[in-house]
Amino acid sequence: MSGPPPPKSREHAVCRVEDLKARGAVAADVGPVRVAVFWLDGEPRALNETCPHRGGPLHLGEVRNGVVRCPWHLWQFDLATGCSPANPNSRVAVYPARVEGGSVLVRAPAPAESNGPPRRAPGMPALPVGEQEPT
């Protein structure tokens, strides 16, 4: 006897291409996860928005040579693989992204494929998009 079919992932429109090109990066809720979407080498790249170190907003990080640096504590992640060039054991999830009809689409994992919403370090409040950790 088999159970119900597994949930399917689906694409979500996160922004217009011209907006992403102008801003360089955006954050958006895509299915069960928050993603950071970057424009790199003529195409969108999407990865988990939350830095695993202390929950920093990766979409606010500086990008150099295809690597984003978290604005809070400078952890780095490759936009293509999600792996840290400094520590291969540290990574963030990457998600398929593409352009169609002027919109950037990101494929979210199905709820069963996700570990739930991004987690922040204990005692760290969630920040609205666009705000940075106080120094």
Image: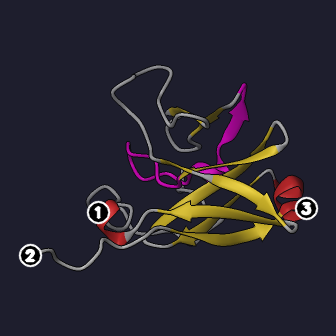
Q: Residue at x 38, y 61 (%)?
A: 118
User: Of marks 2 and 3, which one's residue comes earlier in the chain?
Assistant: 2
CA separation, marks 3 and 1? Answer: 37 Å
Left or right side of 62 for 8: left
User: Of marks 2 and 1, which one's residue comes earlier in the chain?
Assistant: 2
Quadrant of the image for the N terminus? bottom left
Badge 2 density bin: few <14, some 14–19, many ≥20, Cα 10 Å: few
Kindly identify the amino acid type of the residue bearing the numbered disc 1.
Gly
Which one is in front in this view, the residue at disc 2 or the one at disc 3? Answer: 2
Label annotation for residue 123: 1
Q: Which residue is mark 2?
A: 1
Residue range of the region highlighted in magenta in the rendering: 48-65
Kindly identify the amino acid type of the residue bearing the numbered disc 2.
Met
Q: Residue at x 53, y 34 (%)?
A: 81
Q: Dot 3 lies on which element?
A: helix
In the rendered image, residue 89, in percent from the top left (x then y), is placed at: 33, 27
Left or right side of 102 for 132: left
Q: Are marks 3 and 1 in contact (CB under 8 Å)?
A: no
- Closer to the camera, 61 or 32? 32
Q: Dot 1 lies on which element?
A: loop
Q: Residue furthest top?
A: 86
- Closer to the camera, 92 or 110? 110
In the rendered image, residue 108, in percent from the top left (x then y), is placed at: 51, 64
Q: Are marks 2 and 1 in contact (CB under 8 Å)?
A: no
